[in-house]
Amino acid sequence: MTAPLDDVVRHAGEWLRGEGPLHEIVISTRVRLARNVRDFPFLSRADADARREVAETVTTAVRRAPTLRDLVHIDVEHLDELDRLLLVERHLISRQHAEGTGPRCVAFRPDEAAAIMVNEEDHVRIQVMRSGLQVEAAWEQINAIDDAIEEHLDYEFHAQYGYLTACPTNVGTGIRVSVMLHLPALRLTNELEKVGQAARDMKLAVRGLYGEGTEALGDFFQISNQVTLGRSEPEIIDDFSRVVIPKIVEYERAARDVLLKNRPAALDDKVWRAMGLLKSARLISSTEAMQYLSHVRMGLHVGRLSTIDLQTLNELFLQVQPAHLQKLHGERLTGEQRSLERAAFIRARLSTN
Amino acid sequence: MGLCERCKKAKATFHLTNIERSGAKVERHLCDRCAAEEGLLQTPKATIDLNEILENFVASSKAGASELSQLVCEHCGISYVEFRNQGLLGCAHDYDVFKEPLGRLLERTHDGATEHTGKVPKSLGTTSRKPHADLRRLKRQLEEAVAAEDYERAAQLRDRIRELEQP
């Protein structure tokens, strides 16, 4: 069962390629749909047998769908703890799903652009991830996956409330659009409040790298919708692709221009100091590594540094995470051993680059 | 400093801008006396009885809570109070069993919305979509495809847009 996971650590998923519209600021676009299978209790009232039956029903439906044949199926319930964490770091499952109990699984495309979580908070959570700002394309793909599954099972659907979800905050479309942004210049110029304001104006939430309740590591922020009822999917998507994201991207670009124009030495210092630390450190935590990698990424995009390519950088963001590091190393490591191993790994990657 | 537009004697101290239904702005400038006579001047009650308000609030929420605690879904066994404590519903029937209090909650969390207007499962028949909304969506997708340099997809989208634009 773990065999497919031993290889994934060597590369970043398709969505981390660093391509797509506005990719120098928009890391990725994620769309997820929450669904529940008809005639089963929601998970807070489902015992192990009911959960198993839900998992079987959904897995059978997915396997029957011709367009979903090539998915990799993983039994999360019986997966090793480290492998579960690995899936979380790759955004293939949520922390909640990793730490949950009872029968649960995930099926994802080999390129990791789409995943179907079974028995997380709802019976079915479908997600599609894309590089850069591609909300429309992500919606089109997830809509097709949703249709393909629905050919083989019935979802709970209410005439007034739409798709029914365990938490009423997701009812209706069950959609959550999350756009991950890299905003180092806005943080350096102390203008992040502008981002919060732009998001609040459109009733959107700002979160950290791994979603709800997580911190903004390495200047990465997620913007996501909160309203799921009373607005259609294309309307919700429009808020992102037409209104909020272009505005925030403009703010970040302006902040980068200001730094370049008024304080080029301060900017270079941030970028090169970060590079120096990454190349010299003997012990480094993942939080610290993320912060320096973030500054290097900004330096690369504003043309102050060219000794590293984006692909390597994007892979490093993933590979400095605890589970990736341990998988690459081939054995479990304590916190201090990880810091040592992480620093060595980064130095090796940067010297061969 | 202008004079009151009503009595044209006293100094206008009361300024009001009304936005009419048509969107037109109507400005009014009155003296205190004329404003009071027109019923526009509402002095706030000198003292607000905070205790009275609190008592009423507690009384109403107590009555509400005891009524709500009676609400139990016979299908999954969850009570409304349990739902409020854990934040998760127990089954699809809860949306009807708890309709009244849940409806208010939904309105608050979803910016006043009370009804789904999005996708409908294919098995329930297709919704009557407006073609121009589809066209707008396709054009956006085309822009996105071009920006992503996905020309194959762009060509497909262009063809679909042409089809829809045919009279």
Image (cartoon, helix red, strand yellow):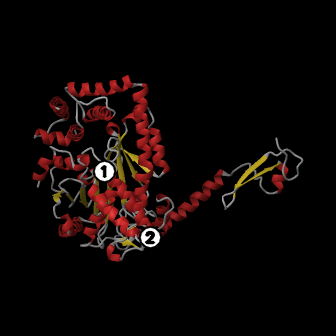
Quadrant in the rendering for residue B92: bottom left
Q: Residue A327 location, x and y as percent?
A: 14, 42
Q: Chain of mark 1?
A: B
Q: Badge 2 local density, few (<14 within 10 Å), some, or many (20+)?
A: few
Quadrant in the rendering for residue A220: top left
Which residue is denoted by mark 2 in the rendering?
B130
Which structural element holds mark 2? Answer: loop
Q: Residue B11 location, x and y as percent?
A: 85, 44
- Residue A168 visible in the current orientation: no
Q: Residue A132 location, x and y as percent?
A: 31, 47
> What residue type is disc 2 on?
Lys
Q: Which of the two residues, A68 or A209, is positioned nearer the viewer here?
A: A68
Quadrant of the frame with the N terminus of chain A: bottom left
Point out the tag, 1 or 2, that comes first from the N-terminus: 2
| Labels 1 and 2 positioned on one and the same chain | yes
Which structural element holds mark 1? Answer: loop
Which residue is denoted by mark 1 in the rendering?
B148
Mark linked to residue A189 = none
In three-dimensional space, the C-alpha distance between marks 1 and 2, rounded to whole angstroms, equals 27 Å
Total labels: the figure holds 2
